[in-house]
Image: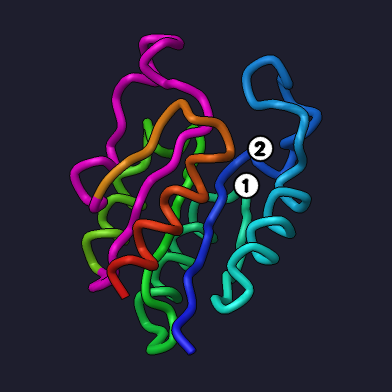
Amino acid sequence: MKKLMIINGPNLNLLGTREPEVYGNETFDSFLEGVRHKYFGMEILYKQSNVEGELVNYIQEAGASEEIFGVVLNAGAYSHTSIAMADAIKAIAKPVVLVHISNVYAREIERRTDLLMGAAEGCITGLGMHGYELALRYLMGKM
């Protein structure tokens, strides 16, 4: 069975309590449980780290796996700073779709530059947690 991997970056382990006016009240675990139930025929793996190097390792792990078809990546603030993550995305032969929960273009100016965008297949921004599901559905359609 082909698998998809969701990778979340820094501070996304705090979803549900972190700035609920920006990110909402739902925890990621609750959201993921619902998505896994909805797409019960698909195995969705999940990784989260606050450490940039670990996120690079997760991307490389997905790239090396014969079972993982694609990656949904919310790199959090590393989207705006990490050339290492952009290089990791370019180094794997798997589709990667970026997700931003908030509309980064309506926020601080430093969030409007995304260093990962050129390496990824696409990006969904500003649609809340629903962006993850849209990214998963897109990748499922490519399988």
Verify whether residue 71 appears in magenta.
no
**Relative to 42, residue 138 above or below:** above
* Residue that appears at 56% across and 50% down: 8
> Depth check: 115 or 26 in front?
26
Q: Quick check: is 107 in the magenta stretch?
A: yes
Q: Decide if residue 39 is on the left or right side of residue 135.
A: right
Kind of residue indicated by mark 1: Asn
Which disc is residue 50 wearing?
1
Q: Position of residue 56 (x, y in %)?
A: 43, 60
Residue found at the far front of this picture: 38
Which residue sits furthest left?
A: 118
| Segment tinted magenta in the rendering | 92-121
Residue found at x 39% / y 71%: 60
Which of the image's four quarters has the C terminus?
Answer: bottom left
Q: Are marks 1 and 2 in contact (CB under 8 Å)?
A: yes
Displayed quadrant of residue 41: bottom right
Q: State the separation of the CA atoms marked 1 and 2.
A: 6 Å
Q: Position of residue 40 (x, y in %)?
A: 63, 74
The number of numbered discs placed on residues in the rendered structure image is 2
Q: Which residue is mark 2?
A: 11
Residue at x 47%, y 70% (from the top left corner): 4
Secondary structure under the numbered disc 1 in the rendered image:
loop
**Tag 2, which secondary structure?**
loop
Image spot of residue 35 (x, y percent): 64, 58
Q: Name the kind of residue labelled 2 in the image.
A: Asn
Q: Most prominent secondary structure in the magenta stretch?
A: loop
Question: How many residues crowd mark 1 within 10 Å: few (<14), some (14–19), many (20+)?
Answer: some
The image shows residue 80 at horizontal and vertical percentages of 37, 31
